Amino acid sequence: MRVARSKTPWIFAAVISLPLLGFSQQQTTPPANPAATADQSKEAKPKPPEEDGIPVTSDVVRQACGSCHKSDEKKRMTRISARRTTPEGWQETIRRMVSLNGVQLDPETARQVLRYLANNHGLAPEEALPAAFEVEKQSIDYHYSDKDTENTCHSCHSMGRVISQRRTKSDWELLVAMHRGYYPLSDFQAFRRFGPPQTTPGPDGRPPDNRHPMDKAIANLSGAFPLITPEWSAWSANMRPARITGTWAIAGTQPGKGAIFGTMTIRAKDGADDEFITSTKLTSARSGETASREGKVIVYTGFQWRGRSTRAASNQASPDQEGLREVMFIDRNMQSIKGRWYTGAYDEMGLEVEMTRIGAGPVVLGMDHPTLATGGSGTYTIFGANLPANVAAGDIDFGAGVKVARLVSATPSEIKVELNIAGDAKIGYRDLFVSGVVKERGAVVFDKVDEIRVKPQAGMARLGGANFPKQFQQFEVIAYNYGPDGKPDTKDDLELGPMTKVTWSVEEYAATYGDDDIKYVGTIDQNGLFTPNVDGPNPQRPRNANNVGDVWVVAVLTRTGKDKDGKDLPPLRARAHLLVTVPLYMRWDTPEVEGGK
Amino acid sequence: MKHLKPINSKARKIAPPDDVVALSQGPAPQSGPHIPLGCTFIFSPGWETDSSGGTAGLCTPVERDLFDCHNGCFWPAQVPDQLNHAPDWTGKCASAQKDWRKIDLIFP
């Protein structure tokens, strides 16, 4: 794989402020004045922001950015005072100041600018959480409430980039002007309406809305995401360094691996109240595999956790040498922290994590196999933290019909028990009690698997391996029981969680006549991991096509047991759509927020 | 025209206003976007899929499209654009379809 950081093409710095203005002579909607942006001319007095702005009190920022971004008497700087966003959002802008606007910043100053702006021009928890998918790099199906705005703004990048911003109206205008300036084609692609204006009234009898898409978007966004909000006023007044040192219990799920349990010890970094050092122990519940990790974290705005951890030294050959990146959100009460840890060339491999503070008492986290089949028996492991040393079989309670036959072993983090599940045990979720401490819905009693579904329902992989890296797609099968009523899709259905003993295959999704994508796209293993084929033109395919394609991913679960009439239960089948597509030739990544690169 | 002014000093030295104006004009509005030969013009949902959500309508192969994307800045978030982030991106190859192994992954 070839990788290059872009050289600073400073020659183009000249261009940016110009198209923004050049356009105003021909356009119906004059772009707002980007001179307010960075006008150095003597006669143009710094324009005081006509709307509210956040004063910039950091000397570092004032010095690093002040040559172009002028201040008014209230220390409000053009552009900078008119915007709030995530650490990633700030980093992206700082990066552009360097790559396209010719700003020179040493790494230490850049870090200080980032931290000041992310903290003081940041987001409140209520504002950051709806956009968490963007920074957690989740590939979810997000739909923004306003269709027109979505159509205008999501063709090139995710709406997450948009909804994680708060700006004054004029700064929303300047943002659009920035796009039009750097990327002149964006007018045709998204921002302007071409063709004659509509004249026929809409179905409601009102005259047609002939505004340009960008103007509609600006109107919508400046209403929905203004600079000053009650949420931010409240949070910025109440904000304080996160007090999170201590020990935390971890419960996570990793597609393809299942439940992960463990503990993390958080220590303060010397001399800092927003930086921490972490030591983590993890156990994969299903396989028993363990790992130790060491990490570093910066907490922004009192709640936004950005960290990176690597496997402890002995394990250098591990696949995540680059480390797992951690994006989490600390709850307001500082008792829980939630988010995603991820890795992979496209951030596609990851786990969902929830951490809870461990006090003096025991915590029950979950089980290796929380699905208890009626009439079955076996050894099960219960995971937790601070579990009592002197626990007895009688202290463990799954409710009626589930007998704890024997205590096999007990440590503070794992208790092994032998369970007998009665043939007539009532099916349903069971709360799991250990010495008086509960894990709600810690287990589920079921008689048979009635249905399986593949998750995700729509997957995506990218070709790679020759010149660019591959993007993998992990699938898993989630099993369901129809509940006591035996009917599908009713409230009493029981989710049994991921199933491992399934057979995976790929089938053609006939999109064109004689479709043969399946021969080229790649392969799926018996753990549901799809590995795409190599990038580059394939001379074996018509028109030298890439190995792209769309296919079905099919899972089959063979069941044992009989139905009511004494017949063998037939196998269950489920499928998902998989798109295998081209690489990205450009990555908008911001490892700086974790203190890296 | 006072705003037609390079904003950093280096740029001021090297960029006579005329060049800059030419660049600032962009393509003529009515001509529509430049669609590379062999590509279906589908902008939404995007780079990864055609309008049906599949791959049959994508540019075939994508490498054939790269120079056009690069020069015209058609996919500014997916393909490094010549105008801004990667002026020399395809400098090492005469044709992306032949020399695609020589192009770099760009972190802007």
Image (cartoon, grey):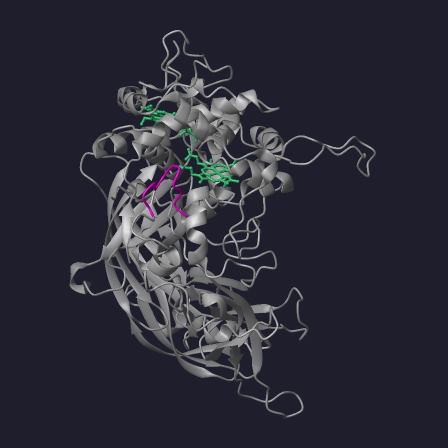
Asked whether residue A70 is in view, the answer is yes
In the rendered image, the vertical position of residue A367 relative to residue A54, given as above or below: below
Q: Nearer the viewer, residue A241 or A101?
A: A101
The quarter of the picture where residue A208 lies is top right
In the rendered image, the vertical position of residue A585 relative to residue A499, given as above or below: above
| Residue at x 41%, y 31% (from the top left corner) | A122
Magenta segment boundaries in residue numbering: B79-89
Q: Quadrant of the C terminus of chain A?
A: top left
Q: Nearer the viewer, residue A478 or A135?
A: A135
Q: Is residue A207 left or right of residue A30?
A: right
| Residue at x 28%, y 48% (from the top left corner) | A4
The quarter of the picture where residue A473 lies is bottom left
| Residue at x 56%, y 60% (from the top left corner) | B57
Asked whether residue A137 is in view, the answer is no
Residue B82 within the segment the image draws in magenta: yes
In the rendered image, the vertical position of residue A38 relative to residue A269, given as above or below: above
Q: Position of residue A298 (x, y in %)?
A: 29, 40
The quarter of the picture where residue A353 lies is bottom left
Q: Position of residue A242 (x, y in %)?
A: 33, 37
Residue A334 within the segment the image draws in magenta: no
